[in-house]
Amino acid sequence: MRLYNTLSRTVEQFQPINDGAVKLYTCGPTVYDYAHIGNLRSFVFDDVLRRTLESEGYQVKHVMNITDVGHMTSDMDEGEDKLESGATREHKTVWEVAETFINAFEKDSAMLNILPPNAYHGRHAPYARATDFIDDQQSLVQTLLDKGYAYPAEQAIYFDVGKLPDYGRLARQDIADKEVAARPEVVTDTDKRHPQDFALWFFNTGRFANHSMGWDSPWGKGFPGWHLECSAIIHATLGEPIDIHTGGVDHIGTHHTNEIAQTEAAFGTRLANFWVHNEHLLAEGRKMSKSDSNYHTLKGLIDKGFDPLALRLLFLQAHYRSQMNFTFSGLEAAQSFLRRLQAWADLKFQPAALAQNAGGPAYGPVLRKMRQAMADDLNTAAALVSLSDLVAEAEENGINNEGFQELLEAADCLLGLSLSSREDVNEDEKSLLSQRQQARHDQNWQLSDQLRDQLSKKKIGVKDTPAGQIWQRL
Ligand code: AMP
Ligand code: ZN
C-alpha cells in the first residue's frame, strides 16, 4: 500500500512497524458545537484509510480522542476556551455541552458509516476524552519539566520550543520563519520565552480565574493545553511510535507540530512514522468553518431531504488531498449516483434482472482493480469508476448473480456505502408488483397504471424491460 506522508512530502510505500497490527491515531472533534460537514469530511477520510488498511489484511488499532477541554479559539493559546464559550451559548455546564455534542458526533458518524475507533476500552470508550486522561497529561508535563523542556510562568506552564533544534520539521518551517509569521498582537503573554512556546498547563488565574474546569496539580490548579492530550493519550493507549497519525491540513503547522515536540522531548522517540492529512472542504470558495457563515451540518442536509450516504459518496468522489468545494448541485448529483448504485444492488432480488448470458460479468477483476486504486494513496474516485462501469454494464445486460452478494460485501468493506445489506420488497409490495405484471399481461393498462401509482406511494418505481418488470426504491 502507498500513502502520502506529510513528513517527506512524497507518496511512500507503507510498512507497519510491527507485522501484527497498525497503530492509527486520529485527532477527534472539539465538542463545543455540532460538527460541520468539513469536519465530517476529515473523519470520512480516516474511515476510508482504516477500511483500506483492513482490506489489505492489516489489523488496525484505531484510537480517536475527544477534545473536551483546553482548546482555545486560536490554536496558539489565545482567545477563549471553546468549551467554556459553548457552555455560555447553550446555558449549560461544560460537561453537559460536551455530552450533547459527543452524542451528536456519534450519531453523525453512524449515519455516515464511519467505523467507531476500536482500540481504547476505558472510561467513555470508544472515544478517548481528554478529561479522562488528566493524570497522564500531568505526568507528561512533569517529565517535560524534569527534562528542561518546559518552564512555569504566571499564566501557564509552557513548552520551550527553543530547546528542540528541529521544532517545526513537519511544517518545514523553522522557528525564525514562524517568528515573522506570528502576529505580535495575538501573543498576549509576555512571559513566554518565545512567541511559539505553547501552553501545556493553564492555571486557573488571570483570564482563566473563572474557568469552570480545573484540576489540582503539583504546580497549581488548572487545566491542560490542547496539544498535550494527543501526546498523552497516544502514550497511554497505543504507545509511541505509532504507524499513522491523521488530521486535517490545518493541524500541520501548530497542533501536530506541537504533538511531535512534546512526545519527542519527553520520550525520546518519534511520534508517528506516517502523517497523513486531508485537505479542506470549502464552501463559496473558502474553508468551511464555524467562524464563517459558510457551514452546513449533517442534520441540516438531512432536513433538506438528503441521504447522509450521498454526502459520504460526494466525499469519495474527490481525492482526500484535494480541496473540494461543496455545492448543493454536487450533492444532488451524488445522491442520484447513490440511488443508481442502490438500484443496481437491488437487482439481486429480481429474477428479471439476471443476466441471460451464461456467466455474465465476472467480479474478481473489478474488485482487484478497486482494491488497487484504494491501496494507491486512497484513490477513491478511481475505485468508484470501476464500480460505476459495472453498474452501467448491468443496466444494459443485467447482473450475474454468481458472486454478486460477495462483491457488494467487499465493496462495502472498502467504501462503506451499505449496498450489501439492502432489503427486498415486502410481501405487500410483492403482491402489488405481481398484480401489475398480470395486468400488463392482460393488457389492462388502466389497472396497471393504478398499481404503478399505488407502488409509487410506497416509494417504489417500476420499469418495464424486455426481460420483465424491474422495481426500484425511490
Ligand atoms: P475540530 O473539531 O475543530 O478540532 O476539527 C476536527 C477535524 O476537522 C480536524 O481534523 C480539522 O482539521 C478538520 N477540519 C476542520 N475544518 C475542516 C474543513 N473545512 N474541511 C476539512 N476538514 C476540516
Ligand atoms: Zn491531536
Image (tube, rainbow, N blue to C red):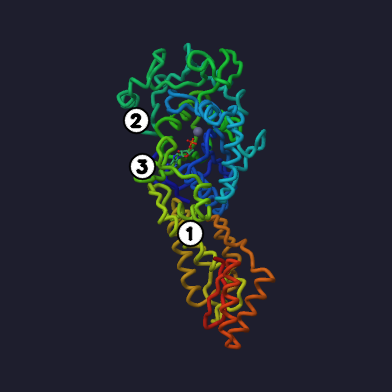
Q: CA distance from mark 2 to mark 1?
A: 42 Å
Q: CB of mark 2 within 8 Å of CB of mark 3?
A: no
- Can you tell which mark lies on residue 76? none
Q: Label 2 to label 3, Cα distance in Å?
A: 24 Å
Q: Position of residue 217 (x, y in %)?
A: 59, 15
Q: Is residue 245 above or below residue 388?
A: above
Q: Which residue is mark 2?
A: 173
Q: Quadrant of residue 417?
A: bottom right
| Pick the front one: 316 or 329 | 329
Depth order, front residue of 303/294: 303
> Which residue lies under the disc numbered 1?
335
Whole-number angstrom distance, CA of label 1 to CA of label 3:
24 Å
Earlier sequence position, callout 1 versus callout 3: 3
Disc 2 vs disc 1: which is toward the camera?
1
> What residue did someone put label 3 on?
286
Tell whether 286 sits left or right of 206.
left
Q: Position of residue 92 (x, y in %)?
A: 59, 29
Residue 148, position in %: x, y?
48, 15
Closer to us: 207 or 70: 207
Residue drawn at 62 percent across, 28 percent down: 132
Q: Residues within 10 Å of mark 3 (few under 14, many from 20)?
A: few
Amino acid residing under circle 3: Arg
Please state which amino acid type lies under the numbered disc 2: Gln
Let me know if residue 263 appears in the view. Answer: no
Q: Residue sitting at 45 percent across and 68 percent down?
A: 389
Q: Secondary structure at mark 2?
A: loop
Q: Position of residue 256 (x, y in %)?
A: 45, 32
